[in-house]
Every structure is written in C-alpha cells, then in structure tokens.
Image (cartoon, rainbow, N blue to C red):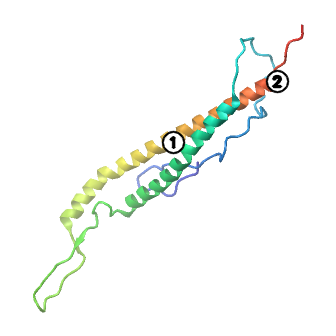
Amino acid sequence: MSASSNPPPGYASDPYLDMLWVAPPFFTGEGTAGSGSPGPESNSFHVALPTVTTAMEQFLSTLYPLVDRYDAVLQQVQSAISGGTIFGQQATYNTQNSHIGEYAQYGLPDTNLRKQGTEFAAQMNPALTRVMRAAGDGIETVGVFLAMLGNAGNAYASADRASAVPLE
C-alpha cells in the first residue's frame, strides 16, 4: 500500500491500495524456521497446498479490480472535495434579456444556492471520506487475510520439510 496524495484540508489520508502479488507465492517452506525443538505429537492431517494456491488465485482475481476501482474513485472523491464546487458552493447564474439593446450578465453569484451547497458539503464531505475509508479498510483486510493464508501455506511446507519419520 502506498501513501495517498494530499487529502483535502481537514481530512485524514485514505490509503491508496496496491497489490502485493500478481500470483500466489510458491510454498517453499523457506524463511519460516522455528526454534528447532520438536513440536508436540499429533494425529495425522493433510494439507492440499494446490487447493490453497487455487483459493489464493481466486482472491487475487477478485481483489485486482477492486483495488483499481477503489483508487480511481478515491481520487475522484478527493478531487471533488478539494475543488469545493461539487455541491454548488460556487454556483452562478446568467441573466437573460430579450429586449433589444439590453445585454445579458453572466456568472452572477447565486448566494442562496452557494449557502445551501456549502452547508450540504459540510455534512457530505466527511461522509464521503468515511465511506472511502471503510471501503479501503475492507479491501485491505482481505489482502491481509490473503497474506496470512500465504504464510500459513509456507509454514506448513516448512514443517513438512523439517518433519522426520521416527526410527524404531
């Protein structure tokens, strides 16, 4: 995850999400060495690492589009909030005269709409920020789960490599 660009004034930065992997890592069992002491005896069990890899691939194929869409929407939201015009805070109007010799005036401030837009933005901008934070946090949580699933697969592969059949 990379740091976000400048947030609108008064707002915390929302995360920009980025994918850690293109494909699940190989389960090599390296890099997860334990204390070297034997673990407790247990009943036999089976872990199908290809099934774990398939599940991780499915997670990745779902996460990639979510991350791309989230980052794009986050930029739009931050731009809209920073621009200060999305809710009519800078609304104007033009006069129209059909009388010959009279001219129209353009860009006159619409004070009533500007006031309402500013009041609405004061409530809506923080709500938009909270929605984006919740979405980013949710996507990031799935990414953390995916990383933990990868660590679990690698830990199993490491334990399998280090296991030995007792000689009797």
Crowd class of label 2 (few under 14; some 14 to 19; many from 20; radius 10 Å): few
Identify whether 134 is placed above or below 148.
Answer: below
Residue 40: image quadrant is: top right
Image location (x, y in percent) of residue 156: 72, 26
Residue 109, given in percent of the width and then of the height, sits at 22, 71
Could you tell whether 85 is left or right of 152 in the image? left
| Element on which disc 1 rests | helix
Report the side of 93 relative to 33 (left or right): left
Q: Is residue 98 left or right of residue 75?
A: left
Q: Looking at the figure, which quarter contains the C terminus?
A: top right
Residue drawn at x 72%, y 14% is 44
Quadrant for residue 164, please give it.
top right
Instruction: Name the residue tied to disc 2.
Output: 162
Foreground residue, 127 or 111? 127
Question: Could you give the CA–CA distance between mark 2 and mark 1, rounded to whole angstroms?
Answer: 35 Å
Q: Secondary structure at mark 2?
A: helix
Q: Identify the amino acid type marked 2.
A: Ala
Q: Residue furthest bottom?
A: 101
Q: Is residue 34 visible?
A: no
Q: Is residue 28 above or below residue 20?
A: above
- Is 54 above or below relative to 113? above
Can you tell which mark lies on residue 139? 1
Give the amino acid type for the residue marked by disc 1 in the picture: Ile
Q: Residues within 10 Å of mark 1 (few under 14, many from 20)?
A: some
Mark 2 / mark 1, whichever is N-terminal: 1
Q: Residue drawn at (45%, 54%), measured in percent from left and top?
A: 73
What residue lies at 79% left-to-right and 23% top-to-bottom? 35
View extreme (top): residue: 168
Q: Which label is found at residue 147?
A: none
Residue lying at the far right in this picture: please name it.
Answer: 168
**Whether residue 32 can be seen here:** yes
The image position of residue 105, as x and y in percent, is 20, 81
